Image (cartoon, grey):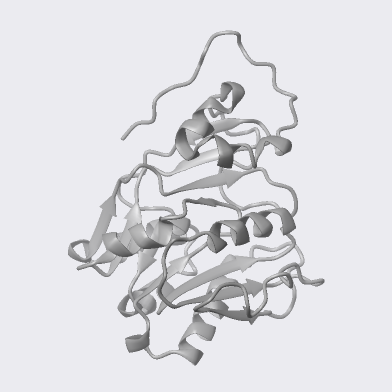
Amino acid sequence: MIALITPTGARQAQFNFCCHFMRRQTYQGPVTWIIVDDTDPRTTDAVGADFRPDWTIIKVYPMPPWSGANTQARNLSCGLDALQANYRNEDIEAVMIIEDDDFYRPVYIERMLANLKGYWVAGERNTIYYNVVYRNYADNNNRAHSSLFQTVFTPESIPIFRSCLPAAFIDAHFFMVMDKAKVNLFNEGTLSIGMKGMPGRKGIGAGHTRMMRFPHDMDWRFLKSMIGEEDANLYVPYFNGIIKYPTHDILTHRRI
């Protein structure tokens, strides 16, 4: 069984996108999706027990509800509690943190599992951020760790992961304390992208505001080159058009 944990709440548009990306995953094995919704009113009721064949849906509603503070660590801990209350370690093949506001290719689960084989942790390096409001993007050039939304780990790693929850940057700390021989950091043509600037509850990471001096993406060409025109067009309505662009093509190639 593959376990997915998604902390969310007050981000209806993002969660709807997340459901779309999970519904079209090509992985055919059993999946348990633990959705941690910490807002009142709830914003995840559209996902029911019949979401997908062989997918078990578990909803968790932490208390007190979100009121503005950063609840990421608490919600991840609640998701892990629900996982371990329902399954033994030997029943779990892998755990993935699926963040509600990010893009995932249909082969995401399949390829992450393939890269995990023989390791305790696997993750995709060189995280791409893309702000859909300002049409800006960045390659974070992270080589020593993967972002949380691009990471998969085995149940043996859960105690180590839990110990990292108090850290300011959970993902970076997790990879810092893991035995490097048990970690596979890879590049595979961007299986997922960190999407920034969507409406609703604001994200806590870099890239959500104009303070980040990212390159501009003329006519969505960079995003289309990353995820294809059909998926890129899903984000076009969220561009607010306030930035004035230079006339020359500033599209740059991604660093690998």
Up the image or down, 184 lies above or below 129; here it is: below
Considering every residue shown, the one lying at the far left of the view is 181
Considering every residue shown, the one lying at the far right of the view is 41
Residue 46: name its quadrant: bottom right
Q: Is residue 130 left or right of residue 126?
A: right
Up the image or down, 216 lies above or below 203; here it is: above
In the rendered image, is residue 201 in sight? no
Up the image or down, 45 lies above or below 14; here it is: below
Give the mark count: 0
> Looking at the picture, how far across and down is residue 233, in whole percent?
63, 37
> Looking at the picture, how far across and down is residue 77, in whole percent?
53, 77
Q: Nearer the viewer, residue 68 or 109?
A: 109
Q: Nearer the viewer, residue 65 or 28?
A: 28
Q: Is residue 229 left or right of residue 116?
A: right
| Quadrant where the N terminus is found in the figure | bottom left
In the rendered image, is residue 79 in sight? yes
> Looking at the picture, how far across and down is residue 226, in whole percent?
46, 36
Residue at 57% x, 39% y is 230
Residue at 58% x, 33% y is 212
Residue at 48% x, 69% y is 165
Q: Is residue 102 left or right of residue 9?
A: left
